[in-house]
């Protein structure tokens, strides 16, 4: 399995518009963060988690030319507003791409982007997705996907476990029942918004505590604002924990 970090930033991205802080003006490429998303490649399949607004440039940067499925964590703009650019994969593949999420997310996305969920036109010139509500595990050959309920503030959303990798972004609390779904992880990818507390996201202190509680072999923090300087925080993290950055590739 390969994991490609397409984006590791928060909803505003880094640099943030109009900001001249040290991180936004940094020359370290690891401080340039597009909106959070990953691509998982396993068994010849390419699974995208969240088509955010930077998806087109992310796919070009990583030279991704095929998608087999899309998983949605939730319906916020920084996680779904690149959905129209999925049409490039429809055009290349000449096939409808399945899109999965919880009931609320799928209803919201199918209402906002209804044209993406209609039958394809003959030229494949628009997005063509099939919507599927996930209420249990999903399997493609040797790849098993388990939706993991988490709380994004007061909003219940999905995290995902894909074999021994879990992607938990945009969360504040983790139900005990979901912790049981995260035992024995090799790689944990975890929300870590900023140093200060936030009502709907983990801050650094909370992310470190949850990472220790889950106990994965390796943990990567993502969904970070411009308050976090890569080199500064990464150098102070405990063994087995590090910051992700756009373009990072992790192999299992």
Image: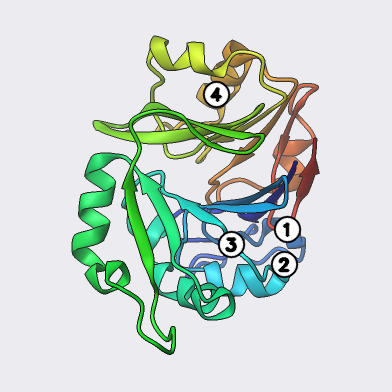
Q: What residue do we see at 29% from left, 66% from top?
A: 117
Residue for badge 1: 247
Q: Earlier in the sequence, mark 4 or mark 2?
A: 2
**On the rendered image, what quadrant is the C terminus found in?**
top right
Q: Relative to 52, is 134 on the left or the right?
A: left
- Residue 8: x and y, percent? 59, 51
Binning the other alpha carbons within 10 Å of mark 1 as few (below 14), some (14 to 19) or many (20 upward) gives some
User: Of tags 3 and 4, which is closer to the observer?
Assistant: 3
- Secondary element at tag 2: helix
Binning the other alpha carbons within 10 Å of mark 4 as few (below 14), some (14 to 19) or many (20 upward) gives few
Q: Earlier in the sequence, mark 3 or mark 4?
A: 3
User: Of tags 4 and 1, which is closer to the observer?
Assistant: 1
Report, in whole angstroms, how far the alpha carbon at label 2 lies from the one at label 1.
Answer: 7 Å
Residue for badge 3: 67
Report, in whole angstroms, how far the alpha carbon at label 1 lies from the one at label 3.
Answer: 18 Å
Binning the other alpha carbons within 10 Å of mark 3 as few (below 14), some (14 to 19) or many (20 upward) gives many
Q: Earlier in the sequence, mark 2 or mark 1?
A: 2
Q: Earlier in the sequence, mark 1 or mark 3?
A: 3
- Residue 245: x and y, percent? 70, 51
User: Of tags 4 and 2, which is closer to the observer?
Assistant: 2
Q: What residue do we see at 52% from left, 81% from top?
A: 91
Report, in whole angstroms, how far the alpha carbon at label 4 lies from the one at label 1.
Answer: 25 Å
Taking depth in this image into account, of 69 and 54 the one nearest to the observer is: 69
Residue for badge 4: 205
In the picture, the disc for residue 62 is 2
């Amino acid at each position: 399995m390969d994991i490609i970090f397409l984006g590791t930033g928060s909803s505003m991205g880094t640099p943030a518009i109009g900001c001249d802080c040290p991180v936004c003006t940094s020359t370290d490429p690891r401080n340039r963060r597009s909106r959070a998303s990953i691509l998982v490649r396993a068994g010849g399949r390419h699974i995208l988690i969240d088509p955010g607004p930077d998806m087109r440039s992310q796919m070009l940067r990583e030279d991704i030319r095929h998608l087999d499925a899309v998983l949605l964590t939730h319906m916020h703009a920084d996680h779904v507003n690149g959905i129209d650019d999925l049409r490039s994969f429809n055009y290349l593949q000449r096939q409808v791409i399945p899109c999965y999420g919880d009931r609320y997310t799928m209803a919201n996305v199918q209402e906002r982007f209804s044209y993406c969920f209609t039958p394809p036109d003959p030229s494949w010139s628009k997005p063509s997705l099939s919507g599927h509500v996930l209420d249990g595990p999903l399997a493609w050959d040797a790849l098993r996907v388990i939706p993991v309920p988490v709380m994004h503030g007061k909003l219940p959303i999905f995290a995902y476990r894909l074999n021994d990798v879990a992607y938990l972004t945009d969360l504040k609390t983790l139900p005990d029942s979901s912790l049981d779904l995260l035992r024995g992880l090799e790689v944990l990818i975890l929300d870590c918004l900023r140093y200060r507390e936030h009502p709907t996201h983990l801050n650094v202190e909370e992310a470190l505590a949850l990472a220790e509680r889950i106990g994965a072999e390796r943990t990567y923090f993502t969904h970070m604002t411009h308050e976090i300087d890569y080199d500064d925080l990464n150098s102070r993290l405990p063994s087995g924990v590090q910051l992700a950055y756009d373009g990072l590739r992790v192999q299992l």
